[in-house]
C-alpha cells in the first residue's frame, strides 16, 4: 500500500457510506463521513461513485517522539478493558501558565486512579518546553501533534488514549477547588445520565441556549469547559465531528449526540439525561480561546459551528427538557 492508498478499513467505511447514500439514509452517511474524515481522508462523490483523497498532515518522528497529523493515527486504548476512576483530557496550545494551574488543581483534588492526558496541539515554544517537563510527571501522558489541528480533532486524539471508563474534558480556564473529577464520575454511576458537568445549558427551541437555573436537575446540554461522559458512549457514538475546528458549540452538539437514543435501544428505554453537578468550588479564569480572537472572528466561527448543530438536531424538540 502506498502512502496515498486508503487503508482497507477506510475503504470499507466509504463503501458503507455509498450504500447508505443510495438508500437515502443520510444520517448514517453523515456519521460514516465523520469517521472517514477522522481517519484523515476526504470523499469526493461523483454520482454513485466516489474517490478518496488524503487530507490529514503526515505523522512526524523526531528524537524518538511521534507527532501525529490526524486523530486516527494515534494508537487507541478504547478497545482495552477500562481501568481507573477517570481520564482527564486537556488541550495545550499557547498558554503554559493556564495549563500548569489546571494540572496543579487536578492533582491536588482528584481521586486516586485518575489518568491525565495532555494533547500538545502544536504548542508555542514556551508551552512545548513546559510540556517536556510535564511528560510522565504524576502519570501525565503528553500526546504531540505535527501541526495545529482543530479542536475536535485534538479532543479525539486525547480520548483515544483514555484508559478509564469515564472521560472528563477540562478546559485550562477552569481551576477546580474540590474533587470535581470524582463528583462527575459519580454522577455517571446513574445509567440514565449520559453527560454531566458543572455548567448546564437549556433551550426553548434549539436555536438559543442559556445558562440553566441553579435548581435545575436535568438540562439540555453541558458546557464543554468541564464535561464528563462514558468512554463506551464515545466508542459507540463518536468520534467528535472534526468539522468543529473551533471549540464553541461543539459541547451542545456532543451533549445532544450523547443524549439521543441509539437505533438499537429498546423503545421503552429511559431518556438519556444531561445532569448539572453543582456545589463544588470552581474558579473560572479568562478563556484564552475566546478572548484571543476578534469579535468578528468569534462570531463567524461560532455561527459556522452552530449550523452543524442545527443540521443534525434542528427538528429534535423531543430532546428538550422544558427549560
Image (spheres, helix red, strand yellow):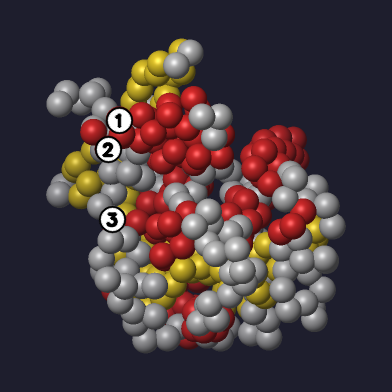
Kindly indicate whether the residue at mark 1 contacts the one at mark 2 (C-beta within 8 angstroms).
yes
At horizontal 46% and vertical 68% (from top left) the residue drawn is 230
Question: What quarter of the picture does the N terminus occupy?
Answer: top left
Query: Could you tell whether 188 is left or right of 139 in the image?
Result: right
Q: Does the image show residue 138?
A: no
Query: Could you tell whether 141 is left or right of 243 in the image?
Result: left
Question: What quarter of the picture does the C terminus occupy?
Answer: bottom right
Q: Position of residue 145 (x, y in %)?
A: 34, 45
Furthest-front residue in view? Answer: 267
- Check disc 1 and report its element: helix, strand or loop: helix
Which quadrant of the figure has residue 269?
bottom right
At horizontal 54% and vertical 35% (from top left) the residue drawn is 25
- Residue 116 vs 305, above or below: the answer is below
Pointer 3 local density, CA inside 10 Å: few below 14, some 14–19, many at least 20: some
Which of these two is toward me, 173 or 277? 277
At horizontal 80% and vertical 81% (from top left) the residue drawn is 215
Which numbered disc, 3 or 1, marks the residue closer to the eye?
1
- Residue 76 vs 151, above or below: the answer is below
Q: Earlier in the sequence, mark 2 or mark 3?
A: 2
State the separation of the CA atoms marked 2 and 3.
15 Å
At horizontal 45% and vertical 16% (from top left) the residue drawn is 48
Which quadrant of the figure has residue 146?
top left
* Residue matched to label 2: 9
* Residue matched to label 1: 11
- Check disc 2 and report its element: helix, strand or loop: helix
State the separation of the CA atoms marked 3 and 1.
20 Å
* Residue matched to label 3: 76
Q: Position of residue 200 (x, y in %)?
A: 71, 68
- Check disc 3 and report its element: helix, strand or loop: loop
Amino acid at each position: 500500500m502506498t502512502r496515498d492508498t486508503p487503508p482497507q478499513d477506510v475503504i470499507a467505511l466509504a463503501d458503507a457510506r455509498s450504500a447508505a447514500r443510495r438508500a437515502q439514509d443520510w444520517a448514517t452517511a453523515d456519521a460514516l463521513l465523520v469517521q472517514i474524515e477522522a481517519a484523515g481522508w476526504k470523499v469526493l462523490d461523483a454520482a454513485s461513485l466516489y474517490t478518496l483523497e488524503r487530507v490529514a498532515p503526515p505523522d512526524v518522528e523526531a528524537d524518538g517522539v511521534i507527532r501525529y497529523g490526524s486523530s486516527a493515527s494515534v494508537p487507541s486504548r478504547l478497545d482495552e478493558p477500562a481501568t481507573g476512576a477517570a481520564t482527564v483530557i486537556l488541550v495545550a496550545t499557547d498558554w503554559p501558565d493556564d495549563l500548569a494551574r489546571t494540572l496543579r488543581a487536578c492533582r491536588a483534588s482528584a481521586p486516586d486512579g485518575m489518568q491525565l492526558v495532555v494533547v500538545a496541539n502544536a504548542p508555542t515554544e514556551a508551552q512545548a518546553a513546559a510540556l517536556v517537563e510535564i511528560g510522565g510527571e504524576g502519570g501525565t501522558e503528553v500526546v504531540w501533534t505535527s501541526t495545529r489541528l482543530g479542536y475536535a480533532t485534538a479532543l479525539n486524539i486525547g480520548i483515544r488514549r483514555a484508559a478509564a471508563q469515564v472521560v472528563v474534558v477540562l478546559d485550562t480556564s477552569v481551576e477546580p477547588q474540590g474533587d470535581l473529577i470524582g463528583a462527575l464520575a459519580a454522577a455517571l454511576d446513574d445509567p440514565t445520565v449520559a453527560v454531566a458537568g458543572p455548567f448546564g445549558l437549556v433551550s426553548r427551541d434549539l436555536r438559543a441556549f442559556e445558562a440553566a437555573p441553579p435548581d435545575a436537575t436535568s438540562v439540555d446540554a453541558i458546557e464543554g469547559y468541564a464535561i464528563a461522559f462514558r468512554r463506551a458512549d464515545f466508542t459507540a457514538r463518536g468520534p467528535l465531528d472534526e468539522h468543529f475546528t473551533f471549540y464553541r458549540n461543539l459541547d451542545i452538539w456532543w451533549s445532544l449526540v450523547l443524549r439521543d437514543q441509539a437505533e438499537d435501544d429498546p423503545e421503552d428505554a429511559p431518556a438519556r439525561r444531561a445532569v448539572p453537578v453543582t456545589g463544588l468550588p470552581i474558579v473560572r479564569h479568562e478563556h484564552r480561546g475566546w478572548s484571543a480572537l476578534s469579535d468578528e472572528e468569534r462570531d463567524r466561527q461560532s455561527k459556522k459551528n452552530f449550523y452543524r448543530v442545527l443540521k443534525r438536531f434542528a427538528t429534535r424538540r423531543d430532546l428538550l427538557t422544558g427549560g
